[in-house]
Image: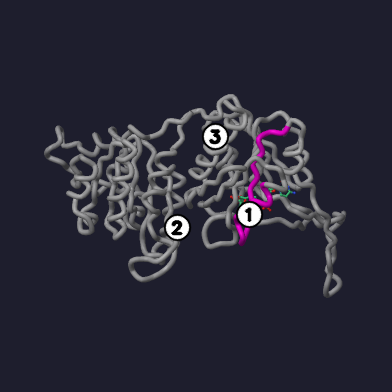
Amino acid sequence: MKTPISKKRVLLAVCGGIAAYKSAELVRLLRKQEVEVRVVMTRSAQEFVGALTFQALSGNPVHTELLDADEENAMGHINLARWADVMVIAPATANTIAKCTHGLADDLVTALALTATCPIYMAPAMNQAMWHKAVTQDNIRKLQAYGIHFIGPNAGDQACGETGYGRMAEPAEICQQLLTESKVNILHGLKVLISAGPTREYIDPVRYISNRSSGKMGYALARAALQAGAQVSLVSGPVNLATPAGLDMIAVETAAQMYDAVLAKAENVDIYIGAAAVADYSPMTVEKDKTKKQAEQTSLMLHKTKDILVDVARLDNSPFTVGFAAETRNLETYAREKLQNKKLDMIAANLVGQEQGGFDSEQNALEVFWDNGRKSLAMTDKFHLAEQLIDLIAQSFNEKNRI
Ligand code: PMT
């Protein structure tokens, strides 16, 4: 079903940070899965952990110099880049991230990042203030736009004594993400319907009630489903995102329009994923003209909108139905309630209103629940997260349909 990267070749680039010691464990975990690992290190990485450690764990010589006189034609970086099926930079320091953003190639690690044509992952590790600096966040966004995947960082106590985001993701998380890197047509021949973005509930011709959904999660799922070989329809609320090529796009504004668009297709698809942030309530009446400012206080009568997920899951010929749960607390309890009450096949729960992840963020983390299982998907860029969720959906769909 999937091409696991075991028996494949991972190029691990270690940069200079205290988290470098964790990368030794990453090598051990990958080797345990029979992955062939080659390690390259920056000069400062060697101040933290000796090259010999990585040589012993990987069973291969460690490369540290850009110009390697021992290599035939002194083109070591080109050969290593060609050798790799996947490259992971862990820890990725703020400095290496900045250099990669600008295409610098003044050491072996950055030269490899620039040369490699395989998927590249970065597991950032740095002081929390460095992580939050606008320039670092800009660099991350640019690298994501260039197709680099990010794993972590996680929040917690830091070696410098501070607390916050910047801890490198745990080696087991990184290993897991690399191992589940999905590649091939796991949804080939299936029709997938996805809802994305916010809805707008009009009060009058110029005002509406909406929410902070950017559509990034839903669009990432649409791209991941396309990549997995599905025929994808996307019902989208108003967002500022380019429509991925190759899908059937239905643009809507209101919850009622989204309901009609989804229900018109739901019986003819195999999988429905409700990633949209649909308004739960909508104004009872939409004023024909712009309402005038008059009284000191005013109120708005709202009615409940129809629940799209519930009605899709209730169809006689219902597709495999995946809901989302956006919560600010009690994530598991509320998500499991939604899974059960809405009679879903699976639910992907995310914390929203936090510093990182959820609405409008480039990254997200999910707790996924289904009848007899659960899986935590660690904080990473939304596309990579979507790839992992699509993978889980494909597995569960196949189990349900006994493929
Ligand atoms: O768009 P982004 O900025 O990338 O942010 C992503 C996200 C946070 C919006 C996304 O990950 C997410 O959580 N989407 C669901 C948001 C939401 O409305 O959650 P909820 O817990 O209120 O709703 C539960 C489920 O019911 C959702 O699948 C929702 O699509 C569905 N629903 C809700 C109301 C309604 N009338 N009809 C529905 O189908």
Residue at x-position 51% and y-position 43%: 383
Label 2 CA crowd tier, 10 Å (few <14, some 14–19, many 20+): some
Say which of marks 1 and 3 sits in front: 3
Is residue 139 toward the left or the right of residue 306 in the image? left
SS label for mark 2: helix
Q: Which residue is mark 2?
A: 137
Closer-to-camera residue (378/258):
378
Is residue 139 toward the left or the right of residue 396 in the image? left
Q: Position of residue 151 (x, y in %)?
A: 42, 50
**Of the residues under marks 2 and 1, which one precedes in the sequence?**
2
Question: In this rendering, is residue 212 above or below 29?
Answer: below
Is residue 56 toward the left or the right of residue 31 in the image? left
Whole-angstrom CA distance, mark 2 to mark 1, is 24 Å
Mark 1 is on which residue type? Ala
Question: In this rendering, is residue 13 above or below 159?
Answer: above
Mark 2 is on which residue type? Gln
Q: Image quarter for residue 257?
A: top right
Q: Which residue is mark 3?
A: 395
**Of the residues under marks 1 and 3, which one precedes in the sequence?**
1
Q: Which residue is mark 1?
A: 326
